[in-house]
Amino acid sequence: MDLIQNQIFLRKTDAWTILNTLLSKVNRADKLTICSFAMAEAFARKLLRERNKIEHLTILLDFTIAKRHRQNLLLLEKIADEIYLCNTHAKLVLLESEYFSGVAAMSANATMNLRYECGFISTDIKHVNTIKTELEEMKRNAIKH
């Protein structure tokens, strides 16, 4: 996926492709935040393989993962610096680094299903800062795992 500022998309893709599009723009991400209703084991394992490119990884997931997919949560404990559980259906990726920041809001959960997905990718600092602020509020209202 080519990344251009303020790009809206509707195409066959998955959350990993979208995340990887942002991650490919930097040698190393200072911060990566992933918010999703669900996260598949395959997605978590890909994160583990790319972990050396991420200084600080924060994951926000719906409470459902603790109930239905406890084994995935146990795997994520070994990968993420911070995990928060809350009532969320949001799906987004926020990447921050010294020279590049971007956010993708999307319909795709953090799974490896190739489907028609829609979303919005932005490198506009106003969009990045808006999402950062709203994620901080979300974390304040979540339970830190």
Image (tube, rainbow, N blue to C red):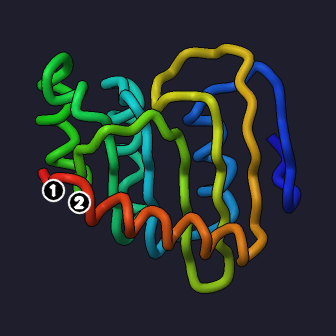
Query: Could you tell me how many numbered marks the image carries?
Result: 2
Going by the image, does 29 lie left or right of 71? Answer: right
Q: Can you tell which quarter of the image residue 138 is in?
A: bottom left
Secondary structure found at label 2: strand
Q: Disc 2 marks which amino acid?
A: Glu
Q: Can you tell which quarter of the image residue 135 is in?
A: bottom left
Q: Disc 1 marks which amino acid?
A: Lys
Going by the image, does 64 lie left or right of 74? Answer: right
Secondary structure found at label 1: strand
Mark sitting on residue 78: none
Instruction: Please state, as top left, top right, bottom left or bottom right, where the N terminus lies in the image.
Output: top right
Q: Are marks 1 and 2 in contact (CB under 8 Å)?
A: yes
The residue at the point 69 percent across, 63 percent down is 25
Q: Which residue in the structure is indicated by mark 1?
A: 144
Extreme residue toward the bottom, this view: 98
Please determine whether, in this image, residue 139 is positioned above or below residue 66.
below
The residue at the point 61 percent across, 46 percent down is 20
Image spot of residue 122 (x, y percent): 76, 60
Q: Which residue in the structure is indicated by mark 2?
A: 82
Distance from label 1 to label 2 (Cα)?
Answer: 7 Å
Image spot of residue 130 (x, y percent): 61, 70
Is 24 in front, or is 98?
98
Going by the image, does 27 lie left or right of 69? Answer: right
Image spot of residue 36 (x, y percent): 43, 37
The residue at the point 33 percent across, 34 percent down is 45
